[in-house]
Image (cartoon, grey):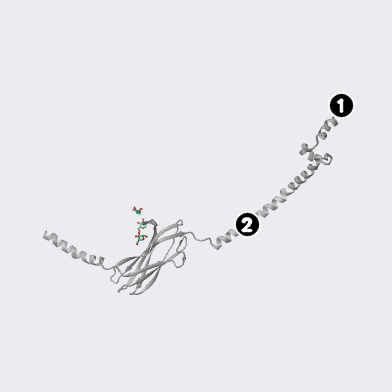
Amino acid sequence: MVKFALVAALLALLVSPLAVSASLPAPNVELTAGFPDSPFGNVVNGQRNKLVVSFSNKDTVSYTVSILSGVLVNPNNFTQIVRNLTALRYDTPIGTGETVDIPFSFHSEIAPQDLGLVVLVDFLDANGNSHRAVGFNSTVTIVDPPTSIFDLQLLFLYVVLAGVLGGIGYLIQQAFFGGAAKGKKKAKKVVEPSIGAAGAVDEKTTAYDESWIPDGHIKKSPVRQSPRLRNKKQ
Ligand SMILES: *[C@@H]1O[C@H](CO)[C@@H](O)[C@H](O)[C@H]1NC(C)=O
Ligand SMILES: *[C@@H]1O[C@H](CO)[C@@H](O)[C@H](O)[C@H]1NC(C)=O
Ligand SMILES: *[C@@H]1O[C@H](CO)[C@@H](O)[C@H](O)[C@H]1NC(C)=O
């Protein structure tokens, strides 16, 4: 029992420095953050998004910022990580009473949606103890980049090309089939009055459409043939 008590006392002694450091008052720092380049605070896919964390040291000791890390999380459950962002290393001292802006740039390639963004700031005190503070913790909207001028120019080029191809197609159509189309139209125009004046219709036209020929005309041919048949018979 005595031995155990001794060991326990030794352990307590060994652990005590850690216990003391853990119970140190939290660093008196204030962090705020924003997207200076993104007026709506949106995260844009495929480009650099710059979050700037303002670190205000209101403490009586100086600190050194060492790491900024970020995660995109489920907006309904901030413990559920959707994407880990690349952590960035710093060695930025922040003296007593100072406020320093720390840029945290990251890229996103994720379907447009609302996600939680949590950025944590790790910083060291003069004794090398690491502390952690929340730099940003809020819902952000992931958006696709706006259509660029280059895309608009490409679209314009496609429209012009389509117009040129359409024009060429029209010319080819006119050259090869335009005449035929006109001929058909002419034939129709000739055929129509032929109802009244069958004599004006040429043989080709009557061959295409005999229905235009008045009944009297069609009945005539057997009558005309009949003398020949009679001649043969005779
Ligand atoms: C939040 O996500 C964590 C990890 O994915 C999960 O264990 C937990 O059950 C979730 N909580 C809710 C309320 O959905
Ligand atoms: C994010 O990183 C943590 C640990 O670094 C890892 O456990 C987790 O699987 C990662 N999540 C994703 C979505 O990459
Ligand atoms: C971020 O905010 C959410 C609520 O909006 C909270 O549940 C979560 O604990 C916060 N995370 C951190 C690291 O402070």
Disc 1 residue type (three-letter): Arg
Picture quadrant where residue 225 is located: top right
Question: Mark 2 vs mark 1: which is more N-terminal?
Answer: 2
Q: Residue 230: which numbered mark, if any?
A: 1
**Whole-percent x, y for residue 132 in the image:** 32, 65
Outermost residue on the left side: it is 2
The image position of residue 54, as x and y in percent, is 39, 69
Q: Which residue is mark 2?
A: 161
Residue 159 against residue 16 in the figure, above or below: above
Q: Quadrant of ligand 2?
A: bottom left
* Image quadrant in which you'd find residue 219: top right
Residue displayed at 73% across by 49% down:
178
Mark pair 2, 1: CA separation: 71 Å
Query: Closer to the camera, 162 or 60?
Result: 60
Mark 1 residue crowding within 10 angstroms, few (<14) / some (14–19) / many (20+): few
Residue type, mark 2 in image: Leu
Task: Locate the C terminus by quadrant.
Answer: top right
- Dividing the image into 4 quarters, which one contains the N terminus? bottom left
- Measured from the top left, where is residue 126 in percent x and y? 29, 72
Position of residue 39 relative to residue 222, above or below, is: below
Name the foreground residue: 224 vs 86: 224
Relative to 190, 130 lies left or right: left
Q: Which mark is residue 49?
A: none
Q: Position of residue 30 (x, y in %)?
A: 35, 69
Q: Residue at x 83, y 30 (%)?
A: 222
